Image (cartoon, rainbow, N blue to C red):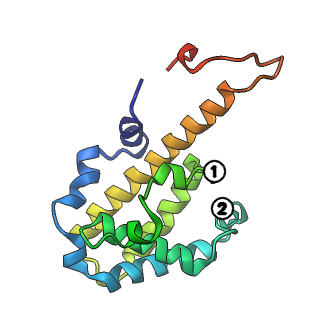
Amino acid sequence: MQSLQQKASEYSGVDTNDALSIDDTNLFEKLGLQTFIDLSTNFYTRVYDDEEEWFRSIFANSKKEDAIQNQYEFFVQRMGGPSLFSQRRGHPALIARHKPFPVTHQAAARWLHHMQQALDTTPDIDPDSKTKMMNFFRHTAYFLVAGDELKTKHQQVTCSCKHHGTKKPSEESS
């Protein structure tokens, strides 16, 4: 059975080592807090203005300002800065936090579309940092897709409908 990291690499086309190259440089020290705030604001402005209703609906129960803060605090923490996210919200636990949302391949692609545009239009991010960040974002988005598929698989396993039968996780094929 493939790990979530392996699935993320397969789906995203980004090797785990490339995704984790964000750890080679302290991007927080290099770019500063305001750049992460600007990136997240730019990103969520695009998300909340998306022309696709199905995509906007994923974020409908969140305040834009809260989404921006959660994202930039996570980015700051993950990319070498202080643990702002964990201090306020606890461990990031990305799969668990995204469990209520439909994290599909289509949603990941749309999310990445907006993130690429936000990266390209946030002026204080140099090309090398953009590449490292986008590799991380692409891999992480598809890590969440793999986690969502696992959630869906477990929901199907626990179905007790007469016409579906019930399987135990150990009886599943990988």
Query: Which residue position is annotated with label 2?
Result: 58
Query: Which residue position is annotated with label 1?
Result: 102
Q: Is residue 40 left or right of residue 75?
A: right
Confirm whether residue 121 shows in the render.
Answer: no
The residue drawn where x is 49% and y is 49% is: 95
Of the numbered discs 2 and 1, the one sitting upstream in the chain is 2
Confirm whether residue 47 shows in the render.
Answer: yes
The residue drawn where x is 32% and y is 56% is: 135
Q: Quadrant of residue 10?
A: top left
Q: Which x, y percent locates residue 36? A: 36, 78
Q: How many marks?
A: 2
Q: Which x, y percent locates residue 161? A: 81, 22
Check whether the beta carbons of the residues at disc 2 and disc 1 lie within 8 A of each other: yes
**Amino acid type of the residue tagged 2 in the rendering:** Ile
Please, which residue is most extreme toward the left here?
A: 24
**Amino acid type of the residue tagged 1 in the rendering:** Pro
Which quadrant of the rendered structure holds the N terminus?
top left
Q: Which mark is residue 123?
A: none
Placement of 41 over or under 129, stated as above or below: below
Q: Which x, y percent locates residue 131? A: 28, 63
Q: Is residue 161 left or right of residue 56?
A: right
Residue 73 or residue 12, whichever sits in front: 73
Q: Alpha-carbon neighbours of circle 1 within 10 Å: few (<14), some, or many (≥20)?
A: some
The residue drawn where x is 26% and y is 61% is: 132
Element marked by disc 2:
helix
How far is the residue under mark 2 from the one under mark 1? Answer: 7 Å
